[in-house]
Image: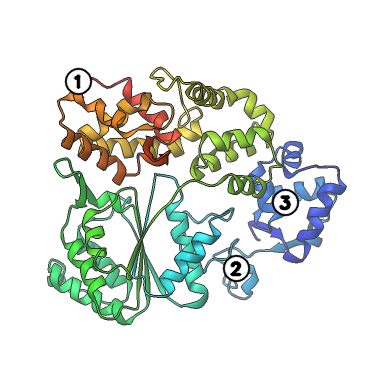
Amino acid sequence: MPRSICVHPDHRATVTSALARQGFLTQGDLAANTLIALSTVSRFFRGIRISIANFEQLCEALDLEPKAVMLSLPDETSENASASPSANALPFDAPESIQFFAYDPLWVGRDSLIATLTQKLAQNCRLLLLTGLAGIGKTALSERLSTELQIHNRYRLLRENFDNQELSADFGSFAVRLLEGCGQPVLPEERSQSGQLTRRLVAHLQTTPTLILIDSLEQILQGDEQTGWSEFIDPNFVTFFQAVLASETFQSRFVLTSQELPAQLVEAGSRYLNLWHRQPIGGLSTAEQQALFEKTGFAADHDLARIGKAYEGHPLALRTILGEIGDRPFFGNVRAYWKRYGQEIESVEQSIAEAAAGNTAGADDKWQLERFTRALRRNVQHRLEKTFERLHQDARYAYILLCETAVYRCPVPEAWWLSHLEDWQQDDNQSMMALDVLRDRYLVEEMIEDTELLLKQHNLIRSVSLAHLKQLTFEA
């Protein structure tokens, strides 16, 4: 017996027309009527498998005969699982052999960026570094790029996630995992020979097309407060990536994600500008936010637009909130969610309005963008707090600078930021190095207004910084 079923592709138009025929204005209305999570309702309409009970309940609400619109999916352990390609199709256009953990079937936007980066990787770019805030969508983008590359080129896919604390993060262990993933046995006596491992791995990747996704590179970096740079804890990684870039030919590709800018990698890449590329990732645009709302089953809504603006298009935060609205007890009722939590967004809007009126500073602003619900605390606050912990450990004065400049509600001149470290006995050079640390970790945003350089914190970062500011003392 199948554990889940889905709408056959030939009948998606049928279920869509049934929604309006039965008097439901949106998928959210259907979710509220059936008390089924909006995310499940959305999967139903997109032809993604859901539980049999939910499938039958939705068909009943739409006055549809389940057997007429369903496609039975065999259990993954069934001996006949490979009999029908369509039965085993993933709910998105991704290669079946790839084990994705961030790939989002509700992906929206970034089309131009994906096309540009895919073209770079298909041509000469051997090493692509995606950088940005935690939760901004770096890993999901790397996985999206891998599927685009697989359309025209067949790569063996390997992946490393340095956020996985169970894996050894030294270069030797990393190289052994990749070699064995490529089907290359490694003798016990070779495992400690970094030079030999580098030569073997580079030689294999030169001739065997392999796509390596490396997540959370910041976990194997260490900040240096004296220089302001983040460098590899194990210098053998530097040697390896230099060898990758220096090779005369190279058939493989690396896509790395990091919350910090690895200075040694940037330096190495500066000598091979056609072979590597760094791409900062920002939040979703207003149009992309609206597309996300629609794809998750929500109609155009002013309150959702306000939420998107307050979070500056941060994908993880928006997906978390949309998931909450779509699940119990709200079941897609945006108005009910706003009535419960809207004051959190209004507090951000009020601060921004006061800044526009000339009240630039607001140390007492009570922002809780990353933590006003349990899901936000679990998905967003937890990840951002890890970022702040690393900063505090690696670069104390950069951490202090980030906390102190949370008082600013809007972009202000760079000199205003630098002045905050005067009370901490930091000279101009030390203050600038602290600011550079924040730049390299994507914790400060820059813009030009009337030829003047202005700095600001992303709203989510400011929300966390304000909380840390209240705990800051001169012994921090």
Asked whether residue 344 appears in the rendered view, the answer is yes
Which residue is the site of mark 1?
474
In three-dimensional space, the C-alpha distance between marks 2 and 3, rounded to whole angstroms, equals 18 Å
Give the mark nearer the N terminus: 2 vs 3: 3
Rendering colour mode: rainbow
Instruction: Choose top left, top right, bottom left or bottom right for residue 225.
Output: top left
Give the mark nearer the N terminus: 3 vs 1: 3
| Drawn side of residue 216 relative to residue 327, left or right | left
- Which kind of residue does numbered mark 3 sit on? Phe
Q: Which residue appears at 49% of the width and 31% of the height?
A: 374
In three-dimensional space, the C-alpha distance between marks 3 and 1, rounded to whole angstroms, equals 59 Å
Which of the two residues, 301 or 329, is positioned nearer the viewer here? 301
Residue 55: mark: 3
Tag 1: Cα neighbours inside 10 Å, few (<14), some, or many (≥20)? few
Labels 1 and 2 touching (C-beta < 8 A): no
Q: Picture coordinates of residue 114 (x, y %)?
A: 50, 62
Q: Secondary structure at mark 3?
A: helix
Q: Picture coordinates of residue 48 (x, y %)?
A: 65, 57
Q: Picture coordinates of residue 229 (x, y %)?
A: 21, 47
Asked whether residue 51 appears in the rendered view, the answer is no
| Drawn side of residue 176 relative to residue 27, left or right | left
Return the residue found at the far top.
364
| Drawn side of residue 35 relative to residue 264, left or right | right
**For discs 3 and 1, the disc positioned in front in the rendered view:** 1
Whether residue 107 is situated above or below residue 94 in the rendered picture: above
- Which kind of residue does numbered mark 1 sit on? Phe
Which residue is the site of mark 2?
88
- Which kind of residue does numbered mark 2 sit on? Asn
Q: Which residue appears at 20% of the width and 25% of the height?
A: 422
